[in-house]
């Protein structure tokens, strides 16, 4: 047998070094290198070289037309919102990473998934965070049938893979990847090198055995999944579970998906019986105002494949600070700064001495530029302390020269707004239908920010 080689991996950034040194050359951290043993097979390519050309299984150049394509075997989980975010169900041999804040409901969702799969697809729930008694009592509370649910409390990845190879589950859940460690490394569980190696091992297992693997990941303060960035590259799909503390609504978002659309949203509500699907979520992200309120604008976002009505709130207030605050929750901070500059230059409203806070109601995150126009309208409405007309919606991208640019799927957004009883829509010219009305709703097409501001009267 070939002699096992060793390498040194940085616990901070996960980069690999051939010899030990005090400081990682990649990230500059001190005393973070730990030794790992590379199995001969893990060393890329080596050992395979002999007899390479004659080897029938060796890779060769082929025309894509000759490649035998495998049709992805998909299984519907039976939780519609989860199926939707995964791109239409569970794919055999896929690895899915689910990230989210503690207590958001990751463990609950995955346990409910196993419950929904029931006897159709065998599952194994590996927990590194809770005892089996805790898992069982949660399953009981979720009113799941306990007998078909198999669970294991284990944190060593080698032993997890061993058990999984014996049990042959079709779905393997590892909760959470930050608690898992490999015998190859001496670093503490949760360190970047441990997370990386353990995830790599589980990914290899998924691909070799065709098991669908779900990894739970903790989220850092910055909102990314704790651990190396490579984790996101390694897996097939990255889903984020988000929600506002205090709100019972939870949004599952596909951030990366090799088998489906990104930014697809699944909406759930947390109840005393676990997570419930919200199959028709359009209007839940509107706050219930008694009447028109200054600083509030409603937009139609289209995250993934369906339109969603979302409220944007702004608060603009005289700032005591030399550098007034600009805070964007659920939106991109830099985009807000840009929009305020455009508002000054092309809308005639100077907010440089004002604190500006913007929030998307319901804890959801809007990433598309269609939010530009509603954000500006909400800011201006708060600044002037004048509510926007009732039953008004708006969407559209704003350019640096004050032009309003079209966004995808305008018609679909307008229809959604009309269905929910909105009476006036301010939209980019190219998104407006030929007729200036959809049902009861008047559609105002605008080319420039100044026209949009005028239209709000
Ligand atoms: P959990 O799945 O443990 O979160 P995570 O794994 O993301 O850390 O979610 C636990 C939270 O959900 C906890 O605050 C209690 C709440 N919850 C309910 O409200 N109802 C339920 O039926 C369950 C199981 C949990
Ligand atoms: Mg958990």
Image: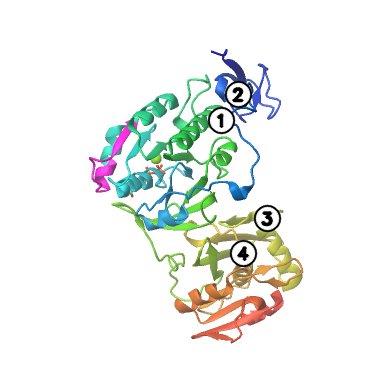
Please report the residue visible at 30 percent of the width from the left and 47 percent of the height from the top: 120
Q: Mark 4 to mark 2: distance in Å? A: 65 Å
414 vs 340: above or below: below
Which label is found at residue 192? 1
Q: Is residue 209 left or right of residue 340?
A: left
Foreground mark, 2 or 3, reads 2
What is the spatial separation of the Cα atoms under label 3 and label 4, in whole angstroms?
17 Å
Residue 422 percent location from the top left of the image: 49, 79
| Distance in Å between CA atoms under marks 1 and 3 | 29 Å
- Can residue 32 be seen here? no
Which numbered disc flags the more N-terminal residue, 2 or 3? 2
Picture quadrant where residue 162 is located: top left
Q: Label 4 neighbourhood size at 10 Å, few (<14), some (14-19), many (20+)? A: many
- Cα distance, mark 1 to mark 4? 41 Å
Residue identified by numbered label 4: 316
Q: Secondary structure at mark 4?
A: strand
Q: Residue at x 66, y 56 (%)?
A: 320
Q: Residue at x 69, y 59 (%)?
A: 337
- What segment is highlighted magenta in the picture? 138-152
Question: Which label lies toward us, 3 or 4?
Answer: 3
Circle 3 residue: 334
Q: CA distance from mark 2 to mark 3?
A: 50 Å
Residue 308 vs residue 172, the one in the foreground: 172
Is 236 left, or right, of 377 in this rendering? left
Is there CB contact under 8 Å for labels 4 and 2? no
Mark whose residue sits in front, 1 or 2: 2
SS state under label 3? helix
1 vs 4, front mark: 1
Q: Which of disc 4 and disc 3 is earlier in sequence?
A: 4
């Amino acid at each position: 047998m070939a002699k096992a080689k060793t390498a040194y991996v940085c616990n901070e950034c996960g980069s690999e070094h051939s010899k030990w040194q005090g400081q990682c050359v990649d990230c500059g951290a001190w005393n973070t290198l730990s030794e790992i043993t590379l199995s001969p097979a893990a060393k890329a390519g080596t050992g395979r070289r002999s007899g390479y050309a004659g080897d029938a299984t060796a890779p060769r150049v082929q025309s894509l037309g000759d490649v035998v394509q495998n049709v992805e075997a998909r299984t519907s989980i039976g939780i519609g919102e989860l199926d939707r975010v995964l791109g239409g169900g569970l794919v055999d041999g896929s690895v899915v990473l689910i990230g989210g804040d503690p207590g958001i409901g990751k463990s609950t969702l995955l346990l409910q998934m196993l419950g929904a799969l029931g006897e159709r697809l065998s599952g194994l729930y590996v927990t590194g965070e809770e005892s089996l008694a805790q898992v069982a009592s949660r399953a009981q509370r979720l009113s799941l049938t306990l007998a078909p649910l198999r669970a294991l409390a284990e944190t060593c990845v080698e032993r997890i893979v061993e058990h999984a190879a014996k049990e042959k589950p079709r779905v393997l859940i590892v909760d959470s990847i930050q608690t898992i460690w490999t015998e190859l490394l001496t670093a503490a569980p949760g360190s970047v090198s441990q997370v990386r190696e353990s995830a790599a091992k589980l990914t290899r297992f998924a691909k070799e055995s065709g098991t669908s693997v779900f990894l739970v990941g903790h989220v850092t303060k910055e909102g990314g999944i704790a651990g190396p960035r490579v984790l996101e590259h390694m897996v097939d799909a990255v889903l984020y579970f988000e929600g506002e503390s205090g709100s019972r609504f939870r949004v599952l978002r596909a951030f990366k998906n090799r088998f489906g659309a990104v930014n697809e949203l699944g909406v759930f509500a947390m109840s005393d019986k676990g997570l419930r699907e919200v199959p028709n979520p359009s209007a839940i992200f509107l706050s219930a105002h008694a009447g028109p309120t200054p600083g509030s604008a409603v937009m139609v976002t289209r995250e993934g494949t369906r339109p969603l009505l979302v409220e944007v709130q702004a608060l603009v207030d005289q700032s005591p600070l030399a550098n007034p605050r600009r805070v964007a929750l659920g939106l991109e901070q830099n985009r807000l700064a840009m929009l305020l500059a455009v508002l000054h230059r092309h809308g005639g409203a100077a907010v440089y001495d004002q604190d500006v806070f913007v929030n998307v109601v319901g804890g959801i995150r809007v990433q598309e530029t269609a939010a530009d126009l509603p954000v500006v309208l909400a800011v201006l409405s708060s600044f002037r302390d004048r509510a926007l007309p009732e039953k008004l919606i708006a969407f559209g991208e704003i350019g640096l020269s004050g032009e309003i640019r079209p966004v995808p799927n305008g018609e679909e957004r307008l229809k959604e707004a009309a269905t929910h009883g909105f009476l006036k829509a301010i939209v980019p010219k190219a998104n407006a239908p030929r007729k200036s009305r959809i049902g009861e709703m008047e559609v105002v097409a605008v080319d420039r920010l100044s026209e949009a501001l005028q239209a709000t009267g």
